Amino acid sequence: MVESDLQDADLIHPARGLWPDLPDAFGALATTRRGGVSTGPYGDGRDGGGLNLGRHVNDDLEAVEANRARLRARLPGPPAWIGQVHGADVVDAATVQPGGPVRMGDASIATVPGVVCAILTADCLPVLFADLGGKVAGAAHAGWRGLAGGVLGQTVAAMRAAGAGEITAWLGPAIGRDAFEVGADVLDAFEAALPGQVEDAFRPYPGRPGKYLADMFLLARRMLARDGITRVHGGDRCTATEADWFYSYRRDGVTGRQASLIWLK
């Protein structure tokens, strides 16, 4: 394992007061755009190297691999990177092998210590899950399509099928309620998914008829509550407005990807 140049200050540590009921059996991290070697639009936003972890965004692949190596040095095993498609399929992270075929899905679970569930985002909502009994970890990628399509509920169902009891969740950095402009199609999708529960999550955009500002964190909490998950933390970091901390596709177009990760120790 290489020694990481990634500093604690470059990372978000949910277990350090941000996720108070996360059991000691789990480790969790969220990366930012800081602490890497990528340059240009993939940099750290402060004229330094950025920790872009996405191979599919036209960054220099050697830089991406160097960034991934820095992250890997902080983890008990290789991240189970999956092919995210804005759907609701859940993958067993233990079946994702480095150098093996890409497993397609938008969530993963783990029941084996050292297997790392990993999600890449740049505005979409990453949600980390842990059961209070310390048996099952989970991570989900919830863009608005996946969120409305039930990816969080599918992840919870997969965790319960794997032996999880009561589950707690943490909402990682995503585009916030004052930046996420959407159209009526998004409102309609959530009205279908959560009848009678979404009006306060969509504010009309001043001066832009038919446009709304959507609160994805609130929508996620409602979706989780529907599946009996009420221990929910986080949801206070905005990728779009915190430009010196996070990559944001909505803000920049060409940009990198940060990761949210969880594992059993």
Image (cartoon, rainbow, N blue to C red):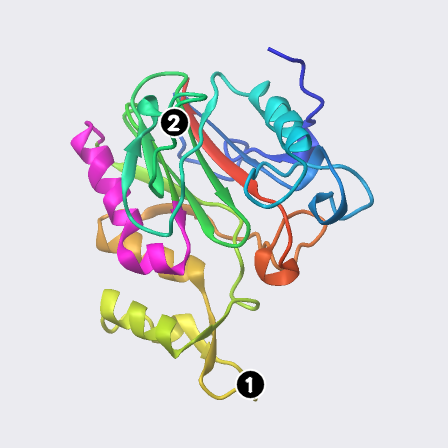
Q: Earlier in the sequence, mark 1 or mark 2?
A: 2
Q: Is residue 149 magenta?
A: yes
Query: Pointers 1 and 2 in contact (CB under 8 A)?
Result: no
Please name whichever residue, 99 or 32, is drawn nearer the observer in this view of the structure. Answer: 99
Q: Is residue 79 magenta?
A: no
Please name whichever residue, 239 or 201, is drawn nearer the observer in this view of the structure. Answer: 239
In terms of image quadrants, where is residue 210? Answer: bottom left
Magenta residues span: 141-164
For discs 1 and 2, the disc positioned in front in the rendered view? 1
Q: Residue at x 60, y 54 (%)?
A: 248
In terms of image quadrants, where is residue 148? Answer: bottom left
- The percent position of residue 220, horizontal first and vertical second, equals 36, 56
Residue 206 is tagged as 1
Please name whichever residue, 208 or 236, is drawn nearer the observer in this view of the structure. Answer: 208
Residue wearing tag 2: 23
The residue most toward the left is 161
In terms of image quadrants, where is residue 63? Answer: top right
Where the N terminus falls, by quadrant?
Answer: top right
Task: Identify the main secondary structure in magenta.
Answer: helix
